[in-house]
Image: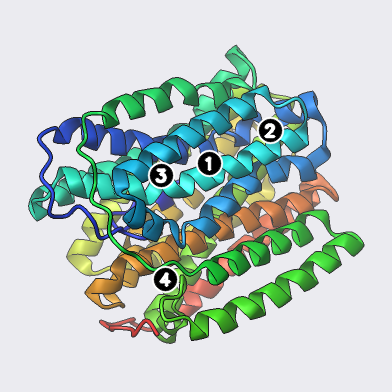
């Protein structure tokens, strides 16, 4: 989704801004390709889920784990992989991340059963969390001039936006023409190409960067346990929820005492930060949860092919990059709050419009009804990112962007878990409950944004 297409990004490593590369174009292309590759993998799987379920079994909860095992590990580790990229050097971190990502993709494609696939997806997510900040650092390395760098970062972000837009269509096409395993095997030649391009890039400087290992570990435990509780339910789900609560409390205590926490709790004293994070999370829940359930709806309820299902997402996904650009221009002219308010209004209206969908609704009508929700999210995310960046001191923008994007990724994973749990008890009733709940969540963010946010400068601790 457009939610990835921002010019502010997670955990900006500080290195390499003073380097000038004689081979900036291959470096820039490698960075864009790597970011697009890991972004594509977050969306390409969704349309292939019914085929994966038919081949490997596991039921709906297993299919939810195929998505969430990647998304949640990606999101949780994103909090600290920027520091890792600094310590290792961007080029080394990028090479490591792409290599592991490609090997994990091969393991996904060769997976004999669902547990093996989910395990390989966990490794993919960890590798993707390394690639993301390292790829952005390579952009900065390739473009030491600030003016040129701004255009390069926009190109990098656009690569992610296009990848999200193409994900459902590519997933449907590969699954129909080849097999669900093709959505993973396609990563191998792309990963090799990224590494070949990286050979033209100079070695990046290593810089000291603090790591909050206890905070990172407790964050992973809390998020994994919470997701398990939502997906699995029952007595084991209740036990997992208790683990999530304890781990979350420990995480908060650690972050309050750490000199260099992965999530500075002081950020959330600022209302603009709270509004930006809450709205970004609501966007992810709405977008990723809706795409997940309607990918199942087209195939399992209406009996369509994976390719057909992918094409039904094309009207909404094709408009997302254009809407991102329009939103940025509106924010530049009128300030970020206006496009945010329009998007925060349009998204719940679109979600409520989908409440009338049932098994007999024309697939083309459903495709059209999906558009307002997606456009609302695409209008909302760029300005909310600007709001987040304006609310913190300049030297903390990378850290704040990491927190924002991690929160959005986590929310997307939890949205899929909740939507899946609801439709598992009855598809049409669960679908309506999911859409109504997501619309209510968005209405809450609109209420939070009822007053002007104003320029602020939050203290990170």
Residue 163 visible to the viewer = no
Q: Are marks 3 and 1 in contact (CB under 8 Å)?
A: no
Task: Please give left or right for residue 32 compared with residue 53 in the image.
Answer: left
Position of the C terminus, as image quadrant, is bottom left
Q: Are marks 4 and 2 in contact (CB under 8 Å)?
A: no
Earlier-in-chain disc, 4 versus 1: 1
> What is the quadrant of residue 383 in the picture?
bottom left
Place of residue 222 in the rendered image (x, y in percent of width and height, measured from the top left): 66, 67
Regarding mark 2 in the picture, which secondary structure is present there? helix
Task: Please give left or right for residue 162 compared with residue 201 in the image.
Answer: right
Earlier-in-chain disc, 4 versus 3: 3
Regarding mark 3 in the picture, which secondary structure is present there? helix
Write down the residue under mark 2. 49
Q: Residue furthest right?
A: 235
Earlier-in-chain disc, 4 versus 2: 2
Place of residue 17 in the rendered image (x, y in percent of width and height, measured from the top left): 16, 55
Regarding mark 1 in the picture, which secondary structure is present there? helix
Earlier-in-chain disc, 1 versus 2: 1
Write down the residue under mark 4. 276
Q: CA distance from mark 1 to mark 2?
A: 12 Å
Write down the residue under mark 1. 42
Write down the residue under mark 3. 131
Q: CA distance from mark 3 to mark 2?
A: 25 Å
Q: CA distance from mark 4 to mark 3?
A: 25 Å
Which mark lies nearer to you, 4 or 1?
Answer: 1
Mark 1 residue crowding within 10 angstroms, few (<14) / some (14–19) / many (20+):
many
């Amino acid at each position: 989704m457009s939610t990835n297409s921002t010019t502010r990004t997670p955990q900006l490593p500080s290195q390499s801004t003073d380097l000038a590369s004689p081979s900036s174009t291959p470096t820039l292309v490698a960075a864009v390709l790597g970011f697009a590759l890991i972004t594509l993998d977050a969306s390409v799987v969704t349309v292939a889920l019914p085929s994966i379920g038919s081949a490997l079994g596991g039921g709906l909860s297993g299919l939810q784990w195929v998505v969430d095992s990647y998304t949640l590990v990606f999101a949780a580790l994103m909090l600290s992989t920027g520091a890792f990229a600094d310590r290792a050097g961007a080029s080394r971190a990028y090479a490591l991340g792409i290599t592991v990502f490609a090997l994990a993709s091969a393991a996904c494609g060769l997976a004999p059963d669902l547990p093996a696939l989910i395990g390989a997806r966990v490794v993919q997510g960890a590798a993707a969390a390394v690639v993301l900040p390292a790829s952005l650092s390579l952009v900065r390395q390739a473009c030491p001039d600030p003016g040129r760098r701004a255009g390069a970062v926009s190109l990098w972000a656009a690569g992610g936006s296009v990848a999200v837009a193409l994900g459902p269509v590519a997933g449907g096409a590969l699954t129909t023409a080849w097999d669900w395993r093709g959505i993973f095997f396609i990563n191998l030649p792309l990963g090799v190409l990224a590494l070949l391009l990286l050979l033209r890039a100079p070695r990046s400087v290593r810089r000291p960067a603090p790591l909050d290992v206890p905070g990172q570990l407790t964050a992973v435990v809390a998020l994994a346990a919470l997701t398990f509780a939502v997906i699995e339910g029952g007595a084991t789900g209740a036990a997992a929820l208790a683990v999530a609560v304890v781990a979350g409390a420990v995480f908060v205590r650690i972050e309050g005492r750490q000199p260099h926490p992965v999530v500075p709790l002081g950020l959330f004293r600022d209302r603009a930060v709270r509004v930006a994070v809450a709205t970004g999370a609501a966007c992810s829940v709405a977008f990723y949860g809706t795409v997940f359930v309607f990918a199942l709806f087209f195939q399992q309820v209406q009996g369509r092919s994976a390719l057909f299902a992918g094409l039904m997402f094309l009207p909404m996904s094709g408009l997302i990059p254009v809407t991102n650009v329009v939103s940025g221009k509106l924010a530049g002219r009128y300030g970020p709050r206006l496009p945010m308010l329009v998007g925060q209004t349009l998204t719940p209206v679109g979600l409520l419009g989908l409440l009338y969908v049932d098994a007999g609704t024309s697939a083309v009508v459903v495709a059209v009804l999906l558009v307002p929700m997606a456009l609302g999210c695409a209008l909302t995310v760029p300005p909310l990112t600007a709001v987040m960046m304006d609310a913190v001191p300049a030297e903390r923008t990378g850290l704040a962007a990491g927190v924002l994007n991690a929160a959005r990724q986590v929310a997307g994973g939890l949205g899929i878990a909740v939507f899946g749990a609801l439709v598992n008890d009855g598809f049409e009733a669960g679908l309506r409950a999911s859409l109504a709940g997501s619309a209510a969540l968005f209405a809450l963010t609109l209420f939070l944004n009822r007053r002007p946010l104003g320029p602020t400068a939050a203290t990170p601790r």
